[in-house]
């Protein structure tokens, strides 16, 4: 072969090789892109399956809540018929288990729908007024958590009228324009239109069981944690630089001191739980602070000052609870003495404010326990002032309640967007008259989806409807 032909053959071979290399690069790029497209799709499928498992856990727990009281210690998998002890074999929800086995921890349920799927873990928190359920589903490398809160539908037979007056002293006449809705009055003024009073109904009994349960559960938790060996003897002083450290136990406790959480800066200090603070003395929060899933338990008073905000907050005080300034809280409050909102302080929808009156060794006194809404404050949710001396007081026409008032006596000056249930209306300082002040009551302004706590009222769960209040996915 002559040199020219040899040169042409070499060039042709080089061209072919270059084309093959280029084709290989193109194929690699296409394959890489196809693999890159497939992997996110696979991940999304796994996340969706994990979410389905978590949602199934919520649904199954709701079934248990409706047909079995899983808060009772006796709740758990059935035992063997020939033994008083649980089986020693595989436990409830364990692979191969038959629903006998070891007892499941109260309010923690592991169950299996399909042997090829994971086991959703479901936890129930009953420390607040409503039912909080958290379910976590895992599928391969994905995990999803769903948090749901449930109450029960508002009982129209009790909360349907705008004003329910369980009075012993006849009520004095007042302009019908002050009450926008029906009235149910045990002893009405002459000529006053009223629904027949419910046979056997008592405000005190209706709220009594709920009040006692909420108080004694919270008081026992405080007492036990203050007696714990890990409780600190001194005071607790926390700032954004030195925040509370809840650790694995989920709480800090101070058996002989008081606690303050102070933020002097302009940036909001976020304290995120779940976490609880137990203190024998006072608890004080001041400044730009945001609380999330925090519980505060005090042997004396709790004070929120300036600009404290947050949601899923719990406060228990053997004394009083004060909300000052521009505080805005979604909160459950249990206090034996007063609950005071003033200076534009607000509670958010879904809150429960419960003033119990003295309990335990301190019971029997004649002092007044009250929920006081003053100085342009707004209270949302359930306001319950229990006991024979329980009162709800709205001090000025600028005050507003968006929710339900349930109290032995009510002194109403502002506006109530919701029903009022009371044994006596107060309009002057002698407390000898049963008379409506300048307040206005608008039953029709209560939101249609307004929900009451599960433990308030009759406890036959098959007779009422669960209502979803909140649904969040992490």
Image (cartoon, rainbow, N blue to C red):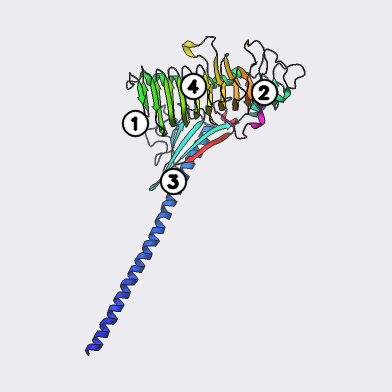
Q: Are marks 3 and 4 in contact (CB under 8 Å)?
A: no
Q: Which residues are magenta?
A: 433-455
Query: Residue 374: x and y, percent?
Result: 56, 22
Image quarter (top left, top right, bottom left or bottom right) of the N terminus: bottom left
Image quarter (top left, top right, bottom left or bottom right) of the C terminus: top left
Please state which of the two labelled residues, at mark 2 or mark 4, is closer to the viewer.
4
Instruction: Look at mark 2 in the image and give the residue it sits on.
Output: 163
137 to the left or right of 463: left
Which residue in the rendered view is the most extreme toward the bottom?
2
Badge 1 marks a residue whose secondary structure is: loop
Instruction: Look at mark 4 in the image and give the residue it sits on.
Output: 322
Query: Residue 40: x and y, percent?
Result: 41, 54
Cα–Cα span, label 3 and label 2 = 48 Å
Please state which of the two labelled residues, at mark 1 or mark 3, is closer to the viewer.
1
Q: Which of 8/95 is in front? A: 8
281 to the left or right of 382: left
Cα–Cα span, label 1 and label 2 = 50 Å
Cα–Cα span, label 1 and label 4 = 26 Å
């Amino acid at each position: 072969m002559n040199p020219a032909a040899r040169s042409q053959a070499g060039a042709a071979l080089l061209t072919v090789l270059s084309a093959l290399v280029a084709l290989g690069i193109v194929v690699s790029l296409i394959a890489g892109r196809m693999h890159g497209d497939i992997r996110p799709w696979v991940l999304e499928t796994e996340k969706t399956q994990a979410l389905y498992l978590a949602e199934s856990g919520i649904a199954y727990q709701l079934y248990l809540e409706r047909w079995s009281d899983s808060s009772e210690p006796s709740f758990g998998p059935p035992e063997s018929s020939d033994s008083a002890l649980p089986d020693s074999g595989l436990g409830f929800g364990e692979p191969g288990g038959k629903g006998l086995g070891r007892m499941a921890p109260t309010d923690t349920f592991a169950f299996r729908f399909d042997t090829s799927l994971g086991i959703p873990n479901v936890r129930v928190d009953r420390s607040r007024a409503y039912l909080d359920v958290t379910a976590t589903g895992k599928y391969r490398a994905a995990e999803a958590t769903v948090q749901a809160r449930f109450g029960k539908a508002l009982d129209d037979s009790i909360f349907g009228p705008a004003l329910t007056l369980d009075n012993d002293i006849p009520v004095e006449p007042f302009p019908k324009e002050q009450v926008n809705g029906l009235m149910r009055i045990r002893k009405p003024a002459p000529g006053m239109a009223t629904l027949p009073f419910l046979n056997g109904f008592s405000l005190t009994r209706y709220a009594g069981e709920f009040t006692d349960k909420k108080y004694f559960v919270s008081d026992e938790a405080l007492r036990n944690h203050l007696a714990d060996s890990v409780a600190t003897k001194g005071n607790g002083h926390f700032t954004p630089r030195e925040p509370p450290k809840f650790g694995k136990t989920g709480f800090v406790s101070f058996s002989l001191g008081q606690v303050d959480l102070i933020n002097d800066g302009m940036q909001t200090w976020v304290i995120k739980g779940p976490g609880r603070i137990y203190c024998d003395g006072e608890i004080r929060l001041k400044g730009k602070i945001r609380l999330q899933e925090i519980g505060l338990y005090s042997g004396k008073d709790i004070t929120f000052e300036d600009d404290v905000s947050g949601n899923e907050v719990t406060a228990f005080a053997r004394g009083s609870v004060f909300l000052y300034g521009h505080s805005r809280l979604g909160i459950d409050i249990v206090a034996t003495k007063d609950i005071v909102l003033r200076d534009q302080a607000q509670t958010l929808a879904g809150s429960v404010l419960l003033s119990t009156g003295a309990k335990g060794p301190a019971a029997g006194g004649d002092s007044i326990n009250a929920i006081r809404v003053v100085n342009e404050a707004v209270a949302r949710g359930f306001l319950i002032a229990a006991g024979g001396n329980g009162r709800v007081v709205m001090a000025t026409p600028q005050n507003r309640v968006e929710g339900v008032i349930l109290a032995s006596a009510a002194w109403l000056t502002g506006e109530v967007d919701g029903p009022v249930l009371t044994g006596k209306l107060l309009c002057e300082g002698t407390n000898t008259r049963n008379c409506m002040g300048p307040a206005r009551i608008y039953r029709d302004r209560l939101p249609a989806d307004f929900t009451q706590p599960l433990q308030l009222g009759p406890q036959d769960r098959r007779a009422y409807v669960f209502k979803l209040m909140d649904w969040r996915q992490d």
